Amino acid sequence: SLGLNYGRRIRRPDYENLNPFVEFIDRYTYEQGNPKLRPQFSHNIELSHTYKSFLTTTLNYTKTNNIIQDVLEQNEEKNESYIKRANIAKQQQIGLAVSAFKQIKKWSGNIYVNVFNNQFEGLVNNDFVKLSSTTMVLSGSTSYKFAKDLTAELGGFYRSEGYEGVFNIKPLGEVNLGFSKP
């Protein structure tokens, strides 16, 4: 089956993001809201294909304006740093996601792979910033039912390095193992 979706989303700043009062994190660092924040708007388009209820492939494109993002700023006179939310940039993202699920008797497993490219462009601390990164997210899980009342599950995920706004996120991952017995 084929599917085509379009969506327009709005993300409004919450009260804490707008509140201009200072919240101290430590002696030299504080957080402050920004009453001038504007809503963030996104346009999304997705083309998806599902094959025999087993494999789903999705190609997506998103364009976002006025991204609300934490920004680190400095007050050099007072030797302080502070975190402030700002409408920093516009973003374009294009990605390809593939997911698969299979169940055979007592065993089931799924895998999900998403590769996307983010491009950010805007003003941060009065400097023009243009960043681009391609990131991969990989996750999966498998479970096996040993007996009527004992099931084991192994799962995990990995995310490669990439930008989220102006922050460079290092690679991270985790592995989980669990057993259940009702």
Image: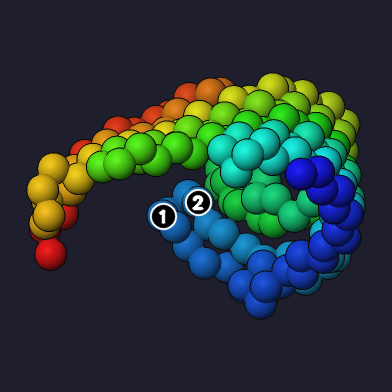
> Does residue 164 sit above or below 147 in this rendering?
above
Could you tell me how far apart the alpha carbons at marks 1 and 2 are, in whole angstroms?
5 Å
Please name the colour scheme applied to the rendered image: rainbow
- Residue hosting label 1: 26
**Disc 1 residue type (three-letter):** Asp
Q: Give me the residue at 67% from left, 36% from top.
A: 51
Percent position of residue 173, x then y: 39, 30
Asked if residue 168 lies left or right of residue 45, the reply is left
Q: Give me the residue at 82% from left, 65% from top.
A: 10
Q: How many neighbours does mark 1 have within 10 angstroms: few (below 14), some (14-19), or many (20 or more)?
A: few
Q: Secondary structure at mark 1?
A: strand
Rendered-image quadrant of the N terminus: top right
Q: Are marks 1 and 2 in contact (CB under 8 Å)?
A: yes
Place residue 14 in its image quadrant.
bottom right
Q: Give me the residue at 67% from left, 67% from top.
A: 17
Q: How many neighbours does mark 2 have within 10 angstroms: few (below 14), some (14-19), or many (20 or more)?
A: some
Place residue 113 in its image quadrant.
top right
- Residue hosting label 2: 29
Q: Secondary structure at mark 2?
A: strand
Place residue 32 in its image quadrant.
bottom right
Return the residue nearer the eye: 134 or 111: 111
Percent position of residue 3, x then y: 82, 48
Return the residue nearer the eye: 170 or 122: 170
Percent position of residue 56, x then y: 65, 38
Rendered-image quadrant of the C terminus: bottom left
**Disc 2 residue type (three-letter):** Thr
